[in-house]
Amino acid sequence: MSEPIGGHHEEEVLGKVYDSRLMRRLVSYVRPYGDMALGSLGLIILSSLLQLIGPLATAVALDLFIRSPGTAPSQVSAPGAVVRNFLLARGIFPADIAVSGLTAVSVLYLAVLILTFLALYAQGYVLQLMGQYIMKDLRGQIFGHLQRLPLNFYDKNPIGRLVTRVTTDVDSLNEMFTAGLVSIFGDLVLLAGIVVVLFWLDWRLALVAFSIIPLLFTLTSWFRIRVRQSFREVRVKIARINSFLQEHITGMPVVQLFNGEGRAFQEFDRINGDHRDINVRSIFYYAVFFPGVELVSAIGVGLLIYVGGGRTISGAISVGALIAFLQYAQRFYQPLSDLSEKYNILQSAMASSERVFRLIDTPVTIASPEQAYSPEVVQGDLEFEDVRFSYKEGEPVLKGISFRVRPGETLAVVGHTGAGKSTLANLLLRFYDIDSGMVRVDGVDVRGWDLARLRRSVAMVLQDVFLFSGSVGANIRLGNEAIGDERIRWAAGEVHALQFIERLPGGFDAVVKERGAGLSVGQKQLIAFARALAFDPSILILDEATSSIDTETEQLIQQALERLLVGRTSIVIAHRLSTIQKANHILVLHKGEVREYGTHQELLAMRGIYYRLYLLQYKDQELGGVEKAIAAGA
């Protein structure tokens, strides 16, 4: 993927309200839970049908058992006529069972209410349960895909936006499944049922009830268009707030160091105020729409009372039919207004699904080949042959790098910042693929290796140590249960971390906070050393690993490394030349090229880049002292 998926401007694109291609992909996540989906569908139909019974029961009660026994046939509603004919066919007159009939209708009404409650409860429970399962599956798929994507993907995409894909966007999809499409289907079933019943009761009065639909449609269209624009602007503003918060909370030490709290607050206050203003505008639209719906619905009810009351007085329809009409009208208008809310849910879900699937469809460009090389034992023979690499096209970082490190040897890599030292480690671990040339491990191109096997054979300690929330022991083991407590303790002891770990509350069970908060930089570095050694790698990479440790601790680590590097192929990237003088070979990089190669004494004798770096680091010594060091080596 050439362009980043992140950035708050992405939130401006809402896309189609309904996209059949996206919907088919979303439905595929429902298939494993088809029983739940069918069950909820049946419950929706059942609850919609049950909601049609109440007004009919009211009409029957009014027409047959509450009004006077002498009611004219023309004044009995259609459902009342059906019940009356049913009773008369069995020799029962409604007037003879007025009390018991009214009781039966009341019991039926109550039973319908209870069944409706149970159906809606079961429907909501099943839908929410299905939604939780779908969210779990979708989030698992997204996170699994994120773990396989190469590092250049993360170079282009902000982490906060990726977190939004896994959290907020998946929540939007869940809302669509549980409160969007399903509710729309339920509303449509209910509306269709009401239309059929109203025309059955009295088609003329039904047309009166539907006469306000153009007004409702106009009001709904206005609300939908306005809220869509407002919805887009709110998402843009909240994205800017998230971006600002993430940046300034992460960079809080810099903000406080340069007394920037006031400026940061003013900027946040401005962004926060913009978000408030957009929300207030959207509140205005809601404040107009819902009372407007109530007003239009009241007009519809008023028309029904006026026209239906006249028809009732003239004997064209019964009182029960009129009351049923009023109840159905109220139930008919409410779903129409709810459809606008469902429209926004569906639109948000389509936008979220497009972003989620765009992430899922991002190709995994670095993966193990089908016939991957995965040896039982890794010797640690490393070779770079004319390697060229660029993070950005047209800006080469490495320009024809060639060298070889034989098993058990230690190669030190030095050079100015930006020379490409850390890039060597990234290419060896195949975090990135080279532009040309060859990177071999044990004579096999790293692109032919099984990625898991390749990376399992390498341990890497970085300058910026990353610790996970959990315990000290868990950060050393990193989920590898094959590494027992004894080996963890041994590894900590070898790098002289055991002493400070045992002083922590709980020792190896001591709680490690996010990113190792509460531990010193040196302590985190020692834990990282213990982590690397506990895995017993064939290849060890130290990338500025001792730069944050005091001199005394560094000397202790050097003593441990002298023993532990034996039998392991090692690459030591360092600025401190004192830490690499005993390396088998030293590689000097300058602007992406190998400028010097040799031992410590050989490079000093060349009086080139390495010689100048050595003088800069030991500028407090007299030049004659450096010359003596060269002579001693000679």
Image: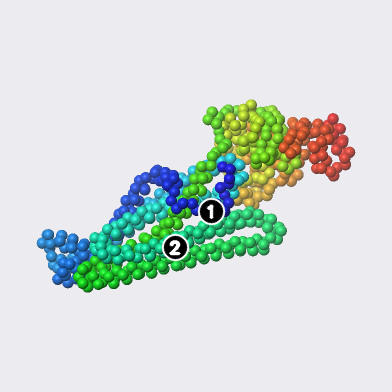
Q: As shown in the figure, which amino acid type bears the numbered disc 1?
A: Glu
Mark 2 crowdedness (10 Å alpha carbons): few <14, some 14-19, many ≥20: few
Q: Is residue 163 above or below residue 78?
A: above
User: Residue under circle 1?
Assistant: 11
Q: Please state which of the two labelled residues, at mark 1 or mark 2, is closer to the viewer.
A: 2
| Quarter of the view holding residue 270 | bottom right
In the rendered image, the quadrant that contains the C terminus is: top right
Q: Residue at x 55, y 31 (%)?
A: 369
User: Residue under circle 2?
Assistant: 222
Q: As shown in the figure, which amino acid type bears the numbered disc 2?
A: Trp
Q: Are marks 1 and 2 in contact (CB under 8 Å)?
A: no
Q: Residue at x 77, y 33 (%)?
A: 596
In the rendered image, the quadrant that contains the N terminus is: top right
Across and down, in percent, residue 622 comes to: 88, 41
Disc sitting over residue 300 in the figure = none
* Mark positioned earlier in the residue sequence (1 or 2): 1
Across and down, in percent, residue 631 comes to: 86, 32
Q: Residue furthest right?
A: 624
In front of the other: 536 or 214: 214
Residue 62 visible in rendering: no
Task: Look at the numbered disc 2 and give the secondary structure of its residue.
Answer: helix
Residue 286 visible in rendering: yes
In front of the other: 487 or 59: 59
Q: Residue at x 16, y 63 (%)?
A: 84
